[in-house]
Image (cartoon, rainbow, N blue to C red):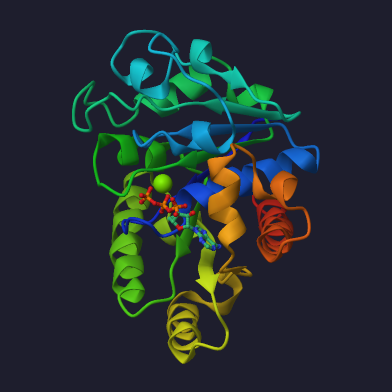
Amino acid sequence: MSAITLVVTNRKGGSGKTSTAVNVAAELAFLGQRVLLIDLDTQSHCALGLGVKLTKSTPTIHGFFAGKHALTPAIQSTQWENLNLIPADPLFEHGSGIKDDFLLRTALTSEGILEQYDILILDTPPSLDTLLLNALYSADRVLVPFLPHFLAGEGVRQLARVLFRVGSNRANEGVRMLVGYVPIMIDKRIGQHKQVSGNVSSQFGATRMLPGVRNDIRVAESFAVGMPVRYYAPKTRATLDYRSLTLSLRHLLDGTDK
Ligand SMILES: Nc1ncnc2c1ncn2[C@@H]1O[C@H](COP(=O)(O)OP(=O)(O)OP(=O)(O)O)[C@@H](O)[C@H]1O
Ligand SMILES: [Mg+2]
């Protein structure tokens, strides 16, 4: 069986991509799935969030893109069973490196990495560059976290256009790649949150709107101590919400034919 590749993306910065990627990865690993998280963003926050320490000589995804080594040497284990990480290089300059949009996809297949996992989760930078395109061309499915604020709808529409382009290029419908949208930091008392989520839902279909994650300071705190929130604060609302999100996501992915 070959792993499903799930790309977590949104062109808008600070929309909860990394928090979602790390916490969904941890939840799936806890449920027994073999998970590889790949951090394409040079902010390198996934390693922080999982308490993985890097040195200057640690192989990274960006070292791979710079042609320094293959992809496999960059796989690191974490403190959590079933959860591995390919970290990012905080010193890599976005825009540098090899200009091949299919490099990642080719290596995932040729190095046999897809055979070793149930799911690959790719966290992406907000910029539209070779790194993001490499992620999208490797994707079976795309998950879009968004903040339910006024401008979010436009960001989501822009992303949908990029997905459509990438999707048609792969002779695969762009929309088919979309597993869903997740509203992040929701507060049901705020009318605008309901309205924006409602708009996204009516535009892209209610079945693509996944259960959201409430505003919870524990998400930021758990990153600061290098742990997924489920281990840092098992009963906090973000832990409960990431669990529901992951179960819904798994249900949708289970119905996925690659
Ligand atoms: N459910 C939540 N409740 C409260 N704060 C949250 C929640 N989810 C994420 N955050 C906080 O929001 C900020 C942005 O989140 P995150 O880094 O996950 O977004 P991002 O889309 O990866 O950002 P970037 O585009 O910079 O990579 C962080 O400070 C994070 O701790
Ligand atoms: Mg991020």
Q: Is residue 115 left or right of residue 195?
A: right
In this view, the residue in front, 69 or 176, is 69
**Is residue 70 in view from this perspective?**
yes
The quadrant of the rendering that contains the N terminus is: top right
- Expressed as whole percent of the image width and height from the top left, the position of residue 229 reads 66, 49
At x 38% / y 77%, what residue is drawn? 149
**Residue 150 in the image: above or below residue 37:** below
In this view, the residue in front, 105 or 38, is 38
At x 33% / y 28%, what residue is drawn? 90
At x 51% / y 31%, what residue is drawn? 47
Q: Residue furthest left?
A: 95
- Expressed as whole percent of the image width and height from the top left, the position of residue 231 reads 74, 44
Q: Is residue 130 left or right of residue 193?
A: left
**Residue 257 in the image: above or below residue 235:** above
At x 31% / y 40%, what residue is drawn? 133
- Expressed as whole percent of the image width and height from the top left, the position of residue 9 reads 42, 52
Picture quadrant of residue 6 = top right
The quadrant of the rendering that contains the C terminus is: top right
**Is residue 258 in view from this perspective?**
no
In this view, the residue in front, 52 or 135, is 52
Q: Is residue 25 left or right of residue 102?
A: right
**Residue 189 in the image: above or below residue 182:** below
